[in-house]
Image (cartoon, grey):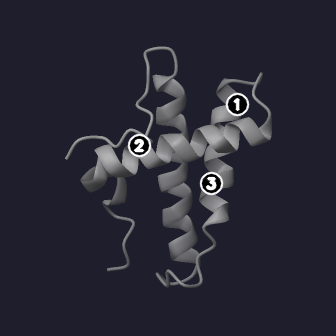
Amino acid sequence: MPTPAAVETPTPENVHLYRAATLAWRTAWREELRRNDGNHRLANPHVPLHVAAVAAQELAPEMTLDQARTFAQKATAWAAQAHHAWFWRGTQAE
């Protein structure tokens, strides 16, 4: 499936930020599900986004938290679309 135009792919200059944000998001989402016994309805979707934004901001301190949050949204949207199987692996309640 081709990447939609609205989803921005990483560039060589920001691929490390994409990786950091995406990995932080996945880790935080898994933890959020564990904390809520796998119940997606109880999991707070803002927690992984905030963790991803902080991870991106740590590597690019010139970004404000709002800019980092927007960047994290773009990074996770790209990963969820372009690498669907990897991005969601292990994050579903089993």
Q: Is residue 85 left or right of residue 63?
A: left
- Within 10 Å of the Cα at label 3, are there few (<14), some (14-19), or many (20+) other Cα atoms? many
Residue type pointed to by label 1: Glu
**Residue 66: x and y, percent?**
76, 42
Task: Provide the secondary structure element on which disc 1 rests.
Answer: helix
Point out which mark residue 32 bears. none
Q: Position of residue 2 (x, y in %)?
A: 23, 41
Question: Please, is residue 43 above or below residue 65 in the view?
Answer: below
Residue at (50% x, 80% y) in the render = 40
Q: Which mark is residue 78?
A: 2
Location of mark 1 (residue)? 58
Would you place residue 63 above or below residue 2 in this image?
Answer: above
Graded by Cα atoms within 10 Å as few (under 14), some (14 to 19) or many (20 or more), the crowding at tag 1 reads: some
* Closer-to-camera residue (28/2): 2
Which one is in front in this view, the residue at disc 2 or the one at disc 3?
2
> Number of labelled discs?
3
The one of 2 and 39 positioned closer to us in this rendering? 2
Q: Label 1 to label 3, Cα distance in Å?
A: 14 Å
Q: What element carries label 3?
A: helix
Residue shown at 47% from the left, 54% from the top? 26
- State the residue position of label 3: 49
Dot placed on the residue nearer the N-terminal end, 1 or 3: 3
* Residue 88 in which image quadrant: bottom left
> Could you give the CA–CA distance between mark 2 and mark 1, rounded to whole angstroms?
20 Å
What amino acid is found at the position of numbered circle 2 in the picture?
Trp
